[in-house]
């Protein structure tokens, strides 16, 4: 099986490289916006759409007029077109909103280029990069020898630092691991991310909550400022920095947690929640998506696959909360405020723990088939 893996490193470009990187940010943004505008106009005036191939041909022609486009990595310009095309595909397949113009003021700037004829490679302690030459890079972990470099993205994050993310591909033989009863059930919890059938409660670390409080404060301050004023832009950068820190610490936390689970168990059972429907229906609004559950499930899925283990999804209509995990009786009603599940059989158990045990048992049943 072919597997992709990304390696992200901090880079320290010199003055010349910085100039060229920012020029490339600008040129790729220009290409993206210009061809987005073309698609919009084409549809508005003739109700027609166009393709990546057509636009790539036009880009080649455009470069003859706008010679400054030739100063930057040409593959990065094609990548910008490719991104635009993907954005439209995602929109048409209802996975994303209508593509938006990229602003100079975007908080994360980036461009992507492909590895052609070994144009991206590691040379000693440096990274050889198209057009930029040798980049000073902090390789905190090595790319294994069996990995092939496919592409790389250079970005500048809201803190001002520069990074390169290198996408690689490698061949791995996956051996399926039988579950042998080593299965855990996870019940989604708003407050704690999840409660497991072993009564493990995954809580975001305290500093994460502190960052969230800081974000709310900073956003409130921003909303009181005069829009587009100098101070407003300054505050906006501050907000973006906190956002970025939250995003990073969330993904760090979820990575550690998911790795730990897939190493410990041979199978993991979860409810197949429809997050979009759920956040609308329960009016949890933003907090459900921010909780990171969707990202967490995606991590569990690919990490389990890599190890030949299984992620089992339980039908979302299975009454995991209302069922007694001891005798199997199903309650008619269970209020959200009832934190302890009590049953006529004598079972008295934490509500979420009861649900996660049920999810585990359902997972076991499903794995038998
Ligand atoms: Zn019971």
Image: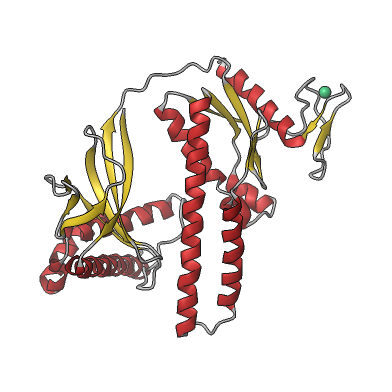
Q: Measured from the top left, where is residue 338 in percent x and y? A: 82, 41
Depth check, front residue: 100 or 201: 201
The colour scheme applied to this rendered structure is: secondary structure
Judged from the image, the quadrant occupied by ligand 1 is: top right
In the rendered image, which quarter is residue 323 located in?
A: top right
Q: Where 81 sits versus 105, above or below? A: above
Q: Measured from the top left, where is residue 22 in percent x and y? A: 25, 69
Residue occupying the point 43% across, 29% down: 305
Depth check, front residue: 179 or 252: 252
In the rendered image, which quarter is residue 215 located in?
A: bottom right
Marks counted in the figure total 0
Q: Is residue 35 left or right of residue 351?
A: left
Q: Is residue 165 left or right of residue 229?
A: left
Q: Quadrant of the N terminus?
A: top left
Residue occupying the point 15% across, 72% down: 68
Q: Measured from the top left, where is residue 244 in percent x and y? A: 46, 60
Residue 319 visible, this angle: no
Q: Measured from the top left, where is residue 152 in percent x and y? A: 26, 51
Residue occupying the point 82% across, 38% down: 334
Residue occupying the point 29% across, 44% down: 167
Q: Where 302 sits versus 94, above or below? A: above
Q: Is residue 199 left or right of residue 113?
A: right
Residue 341 visible, this angle: yes
Depth check, front residue: 220 or 105: 220
Q: Residue furthest right?
A: 344
Q: Is residue 80 left or right of residue 268?
A: left
Q: Quadrant of the C terminus?
A: top right
């Amino acid at each position: 099986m072919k597997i992709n893996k990304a390696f992200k490193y901090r880079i320290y470009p010199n003055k010349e490289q910085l100039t060229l990187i920012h020029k490339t940010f600008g040129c790729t943004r220009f290409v993206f916006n210009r061809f987005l505008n073309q698609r919009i106009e084409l549809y508005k005036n003739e109700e027609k759409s166009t393709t990546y191939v057509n636009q790539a041909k036009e880009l080649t022609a455009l470069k003859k007029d706008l010679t400054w486009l030739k100063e930057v990595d040409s593959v990065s310009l094609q990548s910008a077109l490719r991104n635009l095309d993907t954005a439209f595909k995602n929109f048409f397949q209802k996975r994303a909103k209508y593509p938006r113009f990229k602003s100079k003021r975007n908080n994360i700037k980036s461009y992507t280029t492909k590895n052609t004829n070994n144009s991206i490679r590691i040379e000693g302690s440096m990274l050889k990069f198209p057009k930029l030459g040798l980049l000073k890079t902090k390789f905190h972990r090595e790319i294994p020898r069996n990995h092939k470099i496919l592409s790389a993205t250079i970005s500048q994050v809201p803190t001002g630092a520069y990074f390169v993310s290198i996408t690689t591909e490698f061949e791995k033989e996956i051996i399926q691991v039988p579950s042998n009863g080593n299965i855990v059930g996870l019940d989604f919890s708003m407050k704690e991310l999840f409660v497991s059938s072993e009564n493990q409660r995954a809580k975001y670390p305290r500093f994460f909550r502190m960052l969230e409080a800081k974000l709310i404060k900073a956003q409130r301050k921003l909303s009181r400022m005069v829009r587009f004023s100098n101070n407003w832009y300054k505050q906006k950068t501050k907000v973006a920095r906190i956002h970025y820190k939250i995003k990073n610490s969330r993904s760090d936390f979820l990575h550690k947690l998911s790795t730990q689970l897939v190493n410990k168990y041979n199978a993991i059972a979860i409810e197949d929640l429809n997050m979009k429907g759920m956040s609308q229906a329960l009016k949890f609004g933003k907090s459900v998506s921010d909780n990171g559950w969707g990202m967490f499930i995606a991590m569990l899925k690919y990490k389990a696959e890599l190890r030949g283990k299984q992620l089992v999804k339980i039908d979302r209509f299975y009454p995991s909360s209302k069922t007694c995990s001891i005798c199997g009786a199903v309650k008619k009603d269970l209020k959200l405020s009832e934190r302890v599940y009590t049953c006529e059989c004598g079972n008295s158990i934490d509500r979420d723990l009861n649900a996660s045990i049920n999810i585990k048992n359902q997972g076991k049943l499903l794995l038998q088939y």
